[in-house]
Amino acid sequence: MTEPIISVSGLRGIVGQSLTPEVAIRYAAAFSVLIPAGPLVITRDSRPSGAMLAEAIHAGLHAAGRTTIDAGIAATPTTGILVRQLGAAGGIQISASHNPPPYNGLKLFSAEGRVIPSSAGAKVLRQYRAGTAAWASHDRLGTRQAAQDTLSAHLDAVLATVDVDRIRSRRFRVLLDSNHGAGSLLGQRLLDALGCEVTLVGGEPDGRFEHPAEPTAENLASVLAAVPAAGADVGFCQDPDADRLAVIDASGRYLGEEYTLALCVAHVLGSRRGPIVANCSTSRMAEDIARQHGAPFVRSAVGEANVVDAMLASGAVFGGEGNGGPIDPRVGLVRDSFVGMAQLLDAMAARGAPIGRLADELPRYAIVKTKIAVSPERVPAALDALEAHFRDARPDRLDGLRLDWSDRWLLVRASNTEPIVRAVAEAATADEAQRLCEEAARVLGP
């Protein structure tokens, strides 16, 4: 892997190979050319390589004449809050999200405190590949400032969205697994403010992950047993930059990331009306719940920036992605595990019901995700072949090809980094979803 993986709003790569100090400096400098005058907030998750990359980025931006605000280790949604709070021109979060320890990355934020949309990301990429930078003279170099309080604004914004006294009265016992990522810093403070008795696992933000970083059922096997052992009412599991949340009920059952957004949507629509947005690979639970409440549902292309674009266009009251990333516009326009924790505790308190029962009340589906070998030049014809084969489905080309039936759906999208397409299917049972993916693979086979 010699080139970083560049997405809509940032890049990631293997430190020392595809992600070097030079790459980080060039990418940050390209971003700085395209944003208004003003300081940039620099944050990082807990990965040890983040400190080195932060130093390089600060130096590169100073060489470009930009002032930087050093906010140290912070969750990705906190970065968005800080950009707005400090009136910055933008921000850079150094994080590889759920990728393994050899990886790190850069995520770019606009002055609105959101990850930059695709149009802005394309401009940064062109500037980066052009290899030109506007370096400042000796008397116009930038300087570094230190952020004094990186948590309070985010904490206050989340608390303002829930009934704090109602939650505090329940004295919930919560196990929080931050897995040595950035989430414990605000996670502990938030749960304390909500009157919870907290068992903190992996609370030291040193990047020494105790289990693989992505909060899937397989990776959280050791945490599942820890929840009932601690006598916890609920287990919350964050990824390293704390923009995703997986949920475990009191019995140690993995509810997973798809349920995070669905449970939040069900709770929010119980008291507020307005559009709901989710991307086209997210479980249809959120869509069913919106329909039950008479709320408009909008489907976006995959990617946080695309979800946010659709939320702004529709005036959504809530949105997110099925990877455990809820977005509450009252707090910020970033996926936010802290929003998820607060909303789910508020739902438990309001209903007087355990999280497991609330999950069991939702529409139930099974999602299967597979990969199919398809070379990039064959993708357009492959999607046409799938649409022709599944003539009884409703096709949608918003992002790849999504095929919808009344009781199931299939999404096939090309990978940006491998000669494959990713097939995601959802149906009433895992067997039915698996069969749908297998039928797609047969259609696309050699």
Image: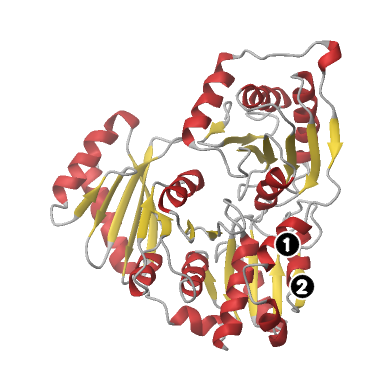
Q: Distance from label 2 to label 1 (Cα)?
A: 9 Å
Residue 62 shown left or right of residue 272 in the figure: right
Q: Residues within 10 Å of mark 1 (few under 14, many from 20)?
A: many
Residue 58 shown left or right of residue 346 in the figure: right
Image location of residue 410, percent across then percent down: 29, 55
Give me the residue at 78% from left, 66% from top: 189
Per the image, label 2 sits on a secondary structure element best described as helix
The three-letter code of the residue at mark 2 reads Ala
Dot 2 and dot 1 residues touching (CB under 8 Å) = yes
Residue 59 shown left or right of residue 419 in the figure: right
Q: Nearer the viewer, residue 233 or 208?
A: 233
Let me know if residue 446 appears in the view: no
Quadrant occupied by the C terminus: top left
Label 2 belongs to which residue? 193
The three-letter code of the residue at mark 1 reads Leu
In this rendering, is residue 253 above or below 18? below
Image location of residue 58, percent across then percent down: 79, 30
Label 1 belongs to which residue? 155
Give me the residue at 33% from left, 70% from top: 291
In this rendering, is residue 371 above or below 354? above
Image location of residue 98, percent across then percent down: 61, 51
| Quadrant position of residue 245 | bottom right
Q: Residue furthest bottom?
A: 352
Q: Nearer the viewer, residue 114 or 353?
A: 114
Let me know if residue 142 appears in the view: yes
Mark 2 or mark 1, earlier in chain: 1
Colour scheme employed for the rendering of this structure: secondary structure
